[in-house]
Amino acid sequence: MMWLRERPWIIAALVVVILVLVVGVRTVAESRSELVTADAYEQDGEVMRALEHYRRAMRGAFPLNSYPARAATSLRNLAKDLEDEGRIDDALLAWRSIAGSSAATRFLYSTTNPMREEAHDQIARLIAAHQRTGIDVGADAEELAAEHRALLRESASPHPFWGTLLLIGFAAWIGGLVVTASRGFDATGRLQWATAWAPLSGALAGFVAFVLGMLFA
C-alpha cells in the first residue's frame, strides 16, 4: 500500500467518487419516495399535500434520475385540473412549484427548460386574467401577461456558472491545503517548496474562484 501513500490524490479521488455515489443514491431514493407519497395523496383527493410532495420530488435532481421529470408532469396535470375546477390560486401554486423547483436544480450545462418556460407562460396568463390590481384595470390581457412573463424570467436564483465555480473553488482550496499539509513538509515540519508550490498554487486559485463565486453567484 506504499504506492497509495505516495499518491494521495488517488485517495482523494476515491473519497470524492464515494461521496458522489452516496449522495446520488440518497437523492434518487428520496425523490422516488416523495413521488410515491404524492401519488398516494392525489389518489386520496388530498391535492394540496400531493402538490407539496411533487415539489419535493422535483428538487431531487441528479443525472439519470427520472423522478423529478415525472413529478413535474404530475404537477402540470394537477395545475390544469385545478384551473378547470376554478381553483385559480391553487393552480398558480402548482405552476409556481414547477418554475421554482426547475430554477433550484439548474446546472452549469443547463439549457432552456420547456417545462419551466410553460410554467412562466401559464403563471403570467393566470395572473393577467384573474389577479389584476387596480392599475391593471383596462390593460390589454396579452400585454399584461407579457409584462408578468418578463418579470418571471428575471431569475433571482444563483447563476449556474458562478455557483458551480464557487463549489469547485471551495473543493480546490480545501484539497490544495490538505495535499500541502501531507506532502509539503519534511519530517521536521519545514516547508519543502519543491513539493509544496503546486498544491499551494492550487489552493490559492481555488480560494480566488471561491471568492468570485460568492460575489457573482
Image (spheres, rainbow, N blue to C red):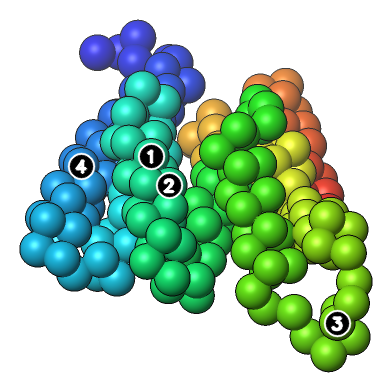
Q: Identify residue for label 2.
A: 76
State the SS at label 1.
helix
Q: Looking at this view, is 131 or 56 the one in front? A: 131
Q: Is residue 66 left or right of residue 110?
A: left
User: Residue 37 sits in which quadrant?
Assistant: bottom left
Q: Nearer the viewer, mark 4 or mark 2?
A: 2
Q: Which residue type carries mark 2?
A: Arg
Q: Residues within 10 Å of mark 4 (few under 14, many from 20)?
A: many
| Residue that appears at 66% across and 41% down | 117
Which is more N-terminal, label 3 or label 2?
2
Q: Earlier in the sequence, mark 1 or mark 4?
A: 4
101 sits left or right of 69 in the view: right
Disc on the earlier residue, 3 or 1: 1
Q: Which sits in the foreground, 117 or 86? A: 86
Secondary structure of the residue carrying numbered label 4? helix
As drawn, the residue found furthest toward the top would be 3
Can I make out residue 130 in this image?
A: yes
Please report contact status of discs 3 and 1: CB closer than 8 Å, yes or no. no
Q: Nearer the viewer, mark 3 or mark 1?
A: 3
Q: Extreme bottom residue here?
A: 134
Q: Considering only order in the chain, which callout, 2 or 4, is on the residue closer to the N terminus? A: 4
Q: Which mark is residue 137?
A: 3
Q: CA distance from mark 1 to mark 4?
A: 14 Å
Residue 59: image location, x then y, percent: 41, 50
